[in-house]
Image (cartoon, helix red, strand yellow):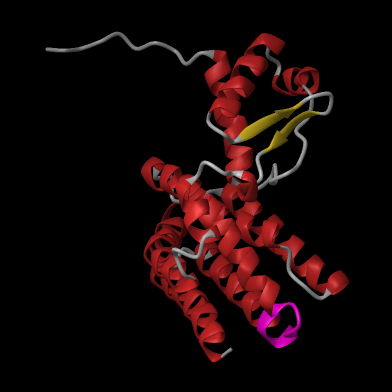
Amino acid sequence: MNIKPIRPKRISDQVFEQIRELIYKGIFKPGQQIPPERELAISMAVSRTSVRNAINKLVTLGLLEHRQGQGTFVSSPEGHRGNVLAIAMATEDATLDDLLEVRMGLECNAAYLAAKRANDNDLLAMQKSLAEMENDMSTDEKIGSESDAAFHMAVIFATKNPVLIHLMRNFYDFLFIGIKKNLSHMYENRDALMAVLGHHKAMLDHIRNRQPEKAHEAMREHILYVQEYFHRR
């Protein structure tokens, strides 16, 4: 039998996973500066070396970027010149419909799974993003693309499916740019923004109440609404 000894995870790997989760969930947003190594080390009760190793790994993966004399920042999807999905979107090789068709398959299934598996932390992440969307509406009469994308990523993370999480993280450039493109045209239509906000509230309610089929349908209605909105333009 090919049985191998179980080895505990290295501290730096645990730090890496925690920071990566904060990025996935949108707690650390694109363009935002993360706390310095010293603060992270104190907060996590680990050495600065462990934090540094984790950050370097995240930089290598393209999730973080060092800026000379400024600090470390969460990479902005629109700045990922090497990402083939972002390039395709920027050069119009892929249409908004193409994007939404893929989101339909991935995110409806994610909402279904999230309603079965979401824990309290996942629900808090969704609620936080929703609260940010509502605050945006009350102050600026628009919804920030970062908080919208963060809500969707929180749903993905709640699936507890590492393949889906990894896939959607690689798809995140497309998701972020697509949401931003969608909302840039909706800024002048308060009714449309209120509808979008209502869709997210319904998704959260169904996920919180453990209603997989209804969560799936709420996500489907949301994506269909966005498709139909732009077809009417």
- Residue 213 within the magenta-colored segment of the rendering: no
Residue found at the far front of this picture = 91
* The C terminus - image quarter: bottom right
Q: How many marks?
A: 0
Q: Position of residue 57 (x, y in %)?
A: 56, 23
Rendered residue at 52%/60% (across/down): 91
Q: Residue at x 69, y 56 (%)?
A: 146
Of residue 82 and residue 202, the one placed in the foreground of this image is: 82
From the top left corner, tell me how far across and down residue 125 is, in percent. 64, 51
Q: Give the quadrant of residue 127.
A: bottom right
Q: Residue, x 72% and y 35% (percent of image)? A: 73
Instruction: Locate residue 199: give its quadrant.
Output: bottom right
Which corner quadrant of the image does residue 113 belong to? bottom left
- Up the image or down, 223 lies above or below 233; here it is above
Q: Main secondary structure of the magenta part?
A: helix
Magenta region, residue range: 186-193
Residue 206, visible in the rendered structure: yes
- Tell which of 44 and 85 is nearer to you: 85
Q: Which residue lies most toward the bottom here? A: 232
Q: In x, y percent, where is residue 135?
A: 81, 66
Q: Nearer the viewer, residue 216 or 49?
A: 49
Q: Residue 165: horizontal and vertical position, in percent?
A: 45, 45
Reply above or below: 101 against 122: below
Vertically, is 57 above or below 91?
Answer: above
Figure quadrant of the N terminus = top left
